[in-house]
Structures are given as C-alpha cells and as structure tokens.
Image (tube, rainbow, N blue to C red):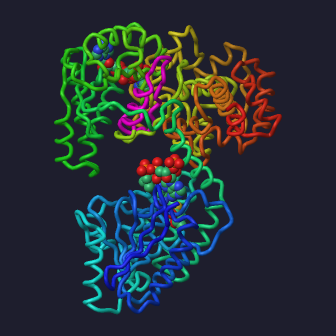
Amino acid sequence: MNQPVTVSRDADIAVITLDNPPVNALSHRLRAPLMEALEKLGDDASVSAIVLTCAGRTFVAGADITEFGKPMQHPILGEIIAALEKIAKPTVAAIHGTALGGGLELALGCHFRVALRDAKLGLPEVKLGLLPGAGGTVRLPYLLGPQKALKVIVSGTPVDAATALEGGLVEAVYDRDLVANAIAFARERVAAGGPFRPVRDRREKIENTDLARFDTEASELAKKARGLEAPIACAQAVRNAITLPFDEALAAEREAFMRLVSGEQSRAQRHLFFAEREAAKVDGVGKDIKAREIRRAGIIGAGTMGGGIAMSFVNGGIPVTLLEMSREALDRGLATIDKNYSISVSRGSLSEDAKSQRMALFTGTTDYADLAGCDIIVEAVFEEMSVKKDVFGKLDKIARPGAVLATNTSYLDVDEIAAATSRPQDVVGMHFFSPANVMKLLEIVRGKHTAPDVLATALAVAKRIGKVPVVVGVCHGFVGNRMLAARSEEAESLLLEGASPAEVDKVFTDFGWPMGPFQMGDLAGLDIGWRNRKSLGKKAIIADPLCEQGRFGQKTGKGYYLYENGRTPKSDPEVLKLIEEKAREHGIERRTILSQEIIERSLYPMINEGARILEEGIAARASDIDIVWVNGYGFPIGKGGPMFWAEKEGIAKIVERLDHWHSRTGKAVFGPAPLLRKLAASGGSFADAREAAA
Ligand code: 3HC
Ligand code: NAI
C-alpha cells in the first residue's frame, strides 16, 4: 500500500504530499500521519515554509464519507487544521483537481492557497445533508465575504480557480507545474517576511456586514430548502461567522455538524451519493469494455423531448444534427431551442457568446441521409410503435456501422424496436426526462441484444452531458414510469372517494416533493397518459373526460387546475363538480381522507411495484430505483428515494397496509409482492435480499 503522507524537501521548503486514492479523502490513515508531519515540520528550524499538495487526480475531495456515523478517531480534521494554523512559518496549499469539503477546509487552514487553472474549490457538504464541519462556514466568509460565501456554502456548487482568485480565496493561479510554482510562491513569502496571518485573524470582510441584507438573502435561500435542514444550518453558520467571535462560531458549527451527521436527512443523502456511484457499475460492463467514440449525435424529432435532448448533447460539447419531418417543424424546434438559451442569457446563467457557440453546434435537416456521419442517433418521435419501427428501419439503412441507435421511448418494447433493424446489438433505450435539458435522470434501457460496449457508450455519454444514468431492463414503462403508473392508479380513486386535487398535492408537497401528482400531470400534459391508456385499452374516470374537454394541463391553460396566469395552479370548481358527478355515477360516497391514507395509497403501491421490478431484475438494485425517483421525479432527497424510505417506514408495516387496502379494494396494485412479504417476515433489507440472491 502507498504511503498516505510523504514529506520531501526543496532546500528549506518542505513539501507534504497526501496520497489516498482515488480522491485523497481525509481518512484516518491519512489524518494521523499528516498531524505527525505538521507537528514535526512546525518545530523544524531548517524548514522555512510548508507546501501542502496531493498526488493523483485531485487535491483532497473531502472528509471520508464512509467514516460518518462510525466512532470518531482522533485526530479529527478540526484538530489538524488548528495545528496547521498555529504554524508560524508560511503554509501554502497547492490545489489541483477538486478541493472540496474538508479538502478546502484544510486549505483554508493554510496561510495561502495557489491553484491550477482548471481546479475547482467548494464546500459541497450541503448536498450530503451536512454543513462544512471543520471551520469552512467561518473561514470561507472571512476570505470571500459573507454574501459570496453564503452562496457557495448553501448551493454546494464549487467555484473555478479564476473566480476563487478574484474573490481572494486563492492568491495565485498557474497553468502548469503546480508544485514548483507553489514552492517558488512560498519562497517569495519567506523573503517578504512575516508575520503571516492565519485566516482566523482576517476579519476585514466580515466587519461592517449589512446584517439585514444578509438575513434577507439567507431567508430567500431558506425558502428553497423545501424541508431540508442542511441549507438552513449552513446559512445560520455563516451568520454566526459574522456575529460571533471565531472560536464560538467554530464551536456552533461543530455542534450543528454533529447534529446533522447523525440525522435522517444526511443519512438519506449519503445513501444517494453512494447509490449514484453504484448505479454506474453495470453487470457485464467491466472496465475492460471500451465505450465507442462519439463525435457527433443525430437527434430525430425536434419536439418537446428531441429539442431538450439535442440541447443536452450540445451543452456537453457534442455537435448535433437535428432531423424533423418538415422544414416548418424543424424551424419551430430550432426556434424553441434558441428561445430556451435566450432565457438562460437573460437570467445571467449563460453568456451571449456561449449561446452563439452552442447554437453553432446545431445542424438542422429533413433528410435522413444527413445522419450517416453520426456516431449516436437518438430518436424522439411520436410514441407509436409503427412510427418508431419505420424510423429504425430507415436508420438501419443509413447509419454508419457501429453507430449507437437509441430510442427515447417512454413505454414501448425496445427489443421490438431493435428488431426493425439488422443490428439489434447497437440498439439501446435512452430515456430522458422532461424537460430533457434540465432533468438529470437518464434511464438506459438494456435490450435483449444490446452489446456491452453500447451500454458503456451510453454511460459515457450520460457522464459527458451531465446526466445521472441508471441501467434498466425492458418492460412497459421501465422503472420510473412503471412505478408512476402504480402511484397514479390510486390517485383518481382518492379524488372519487373525497379528496380534491389540491388536498392530495398538498400531502405530497408536505412530504417534500416539489409538486403533487395532479400538478405534475398538468405540467407533463395529461394527453400523454391518455394516449398511453388508449393504446393499452385502459380508462380513467376523471382524466379521460378532462382530456376529452381539451384540458391537457398547463399547455392548454386547464387541466386538474386552472392556469390563469402561466404556471400557478388554481382550484377549478368545474373539476370539483366533475369529480362529484363521477363519484355519484359510480355510487361512491365521498368522505374526508386523511393525509396518512393518501400516503399509504399513493406511495405504498409504488414501493410494491419497485419490489416487483427488483424481483424481475428490471432494476439491479433498490438503490438504482432511488436514483431514478430522486433524479427523474423529484422524490425528496432528504428521504433518500422510495426504497430507502420504505425501509425506514418499515416493510412489515407497508405489507400490513397493502394487505388492508387489497382486501378492501381487490386492486392488484395493493397485492404485496413476494419480495416484500419475504422481507417483512425476515426483517431484512433490500440489500440483504440482493446479496442472498447473488
Ligand atoms: N469519501 C469517501 N469516498 C469518496 C469520497 C469521499 N469524500 N469522494 C469520492 N469517493 C469515492 C466514490 O464513492 C467513488 O468510489 P467507487 O469508485 O468505489 O465508487 C470514488 O471515490 C470515485 O468517486 P467518483 O466516481 O465520484 O469520481 P469522480 O471523478 O466522478 O468525482 C469528485 C470526483 C468530484 C471528488 C466526487 O467524488 C465528489 O464529489 N466527491 C465528494 C465530495 C464531497 O462531498 N466532499 C465533502 C465531504 S463531507 C466533508 O468534507 C465534511 C467536512 O466538512 C468535515
Ligand atoms: P412531441 O410530439 O413533442 O415531438 C415529437 C416530434 O417528432 C414532433 O416534432 C414530430 O414532428 C417529430 N416526428 C414524428 N415523426 C417523425 C419522423 N418520422 N421523423 C422525424 N421526426 C418525426 O413528442 P415528445 O413529447 O417530444 O415525445 C417524443 C418521444 O419522447 C416519445 O417517444 C415520448 O414517449 C418520449 N418521451 C416523452 C416525454 C415527455 O414528457 N414528453 C418524457 C420522456 C420520453
């Protein structure tokens, strides 16, 4: 095993190199020798400055997340930083890759920070349901000023080296030769002479803070927290940095960190961190399987999804040839893309230049022959099997050998689509979520014949275009939409039996969802489900008449709700009347429905379907399902996804309630899946079941 900490010398400058692959997390095996090295070098009169740097692909990317929730082992990071800060000679952190969380906090313990131009610095703890726990919430505001620090800490989004330089977080940025430059930098500081002020003594940017303005900004951020504790704790901690002496602010931060790290939300968010990384590990797609090279993508259909998918590729730097049936449809699609980028420009998240560069990556066409040079082609045409087969038949004739042929179908059988080609091994599902340029999830649907390197390519493309991929098997609706169908089935019954759309939706938003099922239906377009039901010969008592009246949701200004001014839903007495009429027609007596019942009848069937999906091997692990729901449907991250939440809720309780509703309604969605029964009886978890099956 490598040495986690080594010390070398360049004359009087000592260089400490940390080496704990893959991301130099601050595990105990690294902390103990680091503390020892700092103590030794601090006392060594032959050393006039210390450079702290890392081997491998990155500077320290944070505390070792796997150690959270386990007994603490000294020295803890806060103790190391305190020791570092006591050193009187100049200390310089030399940063490459990502200095994140505890990594940046360690760097903040140094007198100076220098970085490579492509380095990123941030405190992403909030994304793990935490706040920085080793002084980050105090030292960063000291260096950046409280307003900027608040944004960095509450968003968890890293800043680039140029921004860090401008804000005073780093002192110098280099294009290359980081360590040599850091040594030269240290030498200059030694020559310039001390005393060298640690960050803890640099309160200039804190003093004279307009606290009222700070509080207004903090409360704006708190509104977006949607029930999550960490963003609020982060804002409070930055406020403490302004109002409290350094040591008191530090102590308050530590206390908040200890509270959050042992809480349910952080546990859930840490589960999601590792779940996302697990999801990228796919059976049969080992490291030896090479992804195919992707230089240009073809997208067929410039409608709602095709446009968003095309934007995602272009945002990832992949040029796109966009194909439509007619010039008009193509112009419409390109105009929508242009408009979407303009909105980003007006919000300040994209520059005019960047917009022009992105628009230049689009080539429009109505001729399939123009797709011949594409390395991957994603189809997003109407959801009709005959149309999809026709498109794939054409692709088979024109696509170059080895091109990946992907379908964005929501429900259809990918194997049947693949059979329309002579190369089913090159066909894969790439199911994006609406709006496709925003939503992170990508369900990669593995067909019966999909080649491993096609899967590897889809995974690599997902990473390149900033999506979170989950590989799933073929079935109607795959993982997400199949579970959504189980949830939706009961939604109408809740209306008929007494709840209003607004009451059901409120239970969802109280749970932490960004919106409830009826608002979501209105947003997505009720016509999509209507078309799907028709293809399956199914009916919906409320949604069908709504669609027959042209109430497709937001796009028609009416759905379950009224949209008088854009996107704000308003209860519509006409819909409530329709619900009452339909209830009468079906002899259903309406009553008050409590929120617990809404949860049980909406979420438990979904979990039940999730268990069936696991039994069938459509998803490889329960945590993959969590990733689908958190990234594609807004399941609250503080609850860790449906399957994680189910275990906390208690599988035995869920099975008992499913049995109850099954006996009352006779509906298949409530019949507990054998896997759930088994876990309820054994008290085991989904992960245990997977291990047992393996
Ligand atoms: N602790 C433990 N393991 C970690 C880790 C960490 N902080 N960061 C990454 N890993 C592991 C991953 O689980 C993964 O393991 P695997 O290969 O077995 O699946 C491996 O390192 C590689 O990670 P990625 O696949 O994510 O590699 P990328 O190159 O895509 O990304 C990264 C690198 C940007 C550093 C990304 O891993 C990341 O964002 N890491 C987490 C950063 C973070 O949240 N830091 C804050 C931690 S909390 C903290 O510091 C508390 C402090 O305030 C006290
Ligand atoms: P849409 O109706 O907005 O767009 C479809 C586009 O495809 C239209 O512009 C149409 O002109 C074009 N088109 C149809 N046949 C074509 C052909 N043969 N060649 C070239 N272009 C053709 O539909 P939407 O919503 O974008 O859906 C497309 C696909 O994406 C469907 O399979 C749908 O199930 C799937 N999907 C839709 C989601 C949504 O929320 N809308 C979410 C995820 C997947």
Q: Is residue 147 magenta?
A: no
Q: Is residue 181 left or right of residue 385?
A: left
Position in image of residue 636 (x %, y %) = 56, 44
In the rendered image, is residue 693 in sight?
A: yes
Residue 248, placed above or below residue 596: below
Left or right: 499 in relation to 152: right
Write the start and end of the magenta stretch as one range.
Answer: 433-462
Quarter location, residue 217? bottom left
Q: Quadrant of residue 439?
A: top left
Res. 223 in view: no
Please name whichever residue, 13 or 244, is drawn nearer the observer in this view of the structure: 13
Q: Quadrant of residue 550?
A: top left
Q: Quadrant of the C terminus?
A: top right
Using the image as rendered, state which of residue 74 and residue 654 is in the foreground: 74
Image point 27% across, 43% down: which residue? 343
The percent position of residue 266, horizontal first and vertical second, equals: 60, 55
The structure residue drawn at horizontal position 79% and vertical position 37%, both measured from the top left corner, is 653
Does residue 645 lie above or below 78 as drawn? above
Above or below, 534 against 59 in this view is above
Q: How many marks?
A: 0
Residue sitting at x 37%, y 73%: 93
Q: Residue at x 67, y 25 (%)?
A: 615
- The answer to which of 558 and 515 lies nearer the viewer is 515
Please, which residue is most extreme toward the front here?
1
Q: Any magenta on residue 438?
A: yes
Residue 388 position within the rendered picture, expressed as x and y whole percent measured from the top left: 38, 12
Name the spot of residue 190 as percent of width and height, x first: 29, 88
Left or right: 421 in relation to 163: right
Residue farthest along the right direction in this orientation: 681
Q: Nearer the viewer, residue 141 or 216?
A: 141
